[in-house]
Amino acid sequence: MLKKTFPINMYPMAHVLPKSGKVWFVAGHESASVDLKTGVETAGPALPQDGVLGRSFPFAASNFLTPLTYRNNYESTFFTCGGVDSTNGKRDGDQPYANCPTCPATDKCYHINPENPTQWTIEKMPLARSQPLAVNLPNMKVALIGGTGRGHQGGNAGTPYNFDPVNKVVIFDPFKPTGDAQRWAVAAEAKIARQYHATAVLRTDGSIVTGGGDVQNFADINSDPYEMRLEVYSPPYMFIPNRPSLQLEAVPKAITYGQTFVVPFAGDVGPSIMSVTMVRYSTVTHTLNTDQRVVELKITKYGKNKLLVESPPDANVAVPGPWMLWAVDNRGAPVMEAATVSLRASNPKEDAAWDEKDTVKPDQATLDAQSGITPAGSGALRLGGFAAASSLIAGAVAALLL
């Protein structure tokens, strides 16, 4: 695949698939899966030739997997969103790598079931953007941040090929069906543009820190070409009052696969918790973040101030390494601070003890929220009754000037 897509194949999108354990790749317009045990590469369907340039550097689009959950046997859907539309701009030549700083961004997203890739499905974002940043959230939604309305990656500091910053965040809810007004929700607007060489990562308090970008301060490009400020985006859930808290010192520091362990809370909030998720610590460059993924854990017992949960079944579902451990209540409010757990096959397996006298029933509001989760084609999910109040949808952006 990389040979076929050369030279538009740098920073290929890559994800370990939860069922087969193969690695799914997308570069340029092409897709493939690779079995690392046998070395066999299997070609997948090409993205439509619809005028959108290959999704790799420098015409990069964003990408992410939908949440992985035991509820639908860890079905996954791969999304690639945004990029560069060549049908309405003049390129600097006929070569595949010819720049097009006048080309507008696209609002197109394509998604596919990477375990059984037969056909790409299109839907559209509310805002067109090239090189957006995608961040998985503890409530299993995705925040799309930054990018530009014209041009693409490349160029030197002070001489960019990308213009017209897109500063409004969009929250994607994979639990809402296609066509639902809240599936793609426009949220708060950043004050600092995030374009080429920008980053955005989830923090343990649930906020997202954004940074970087060439020539994004629009100052003197000779003396000050780089964007050195950080900015913190607070998603809507951070404005829900009285968010629950973990008893951080009592959370296991290390777990292994298929293990039961206790999630303890600082207060009697157990019956209100609708989901426990793990979000992997991540790394970002050139719109690419192949580390991140979200896995929902199965809650097997409810207690007044604790839950008994099961860790992911294997390394295909949740690759080894450090993860944030989250719990989200039936209002959609995550805990105030995530715990950090090390997940590895080599960690000792010590299933937690549980006294049945501690077992209680979950709140009816929790059951109502959980009952809406059902598989919905290509591995996507629907979730009814799980949304922040409309007054919170904008979130907030706070600048940290360094």
Image (cartoon, rainbow, N blue to C red):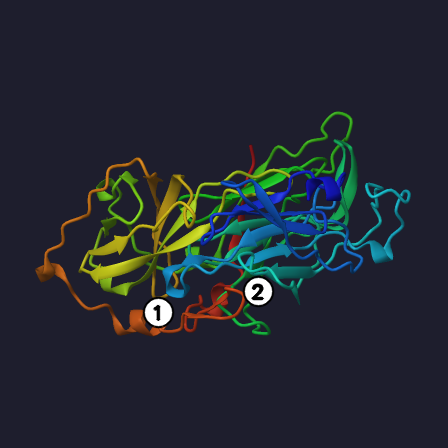
Q: Quadrant of the C terminus?
A: top right
Dot 2 amino acid type: Ala
- At 31% from the left edge and 35% from the top edge, which residue is drawn? 346
Give the spatial CA distance, label 1 vs label 2. 22 Å
Res 125 visible: no
- At 77% from the left edge and 55% from the top edge, which residue is drawn? 52
Q: Which mark is residue 185?
A: 2
Q: Nearer the viewer, residue 370 or 266?
A: 370
Where in the figure is residue 66, as x and y percent of width and height? 50, 58
Q: How many marks?
A: 2
Which quadrant of the structure image shows residue 87? bottom right
Res 22 visible: yes
Q: Which mark is residue 370?
A: 1
Q: Is residue 309 left or right of residue 181?
A: left
Task: Kindly report which numbered mark, 1 or 2, lies closer to the viewer in this rendering.
Answer: 1
Q: Nearer the viewer, residue 74 or 246?
A: 74
- The 10 Å Cα crowd at callout 1, few under 14, some 14 to 19, many 20 or more, is some
Which quadrant of the structure image shows residue 367? bottom left
- At 60% from the left edge and 74% from the top edge, which residue is drawn? 179
Q: Is residue 357 left or right of residue 21?
A: left
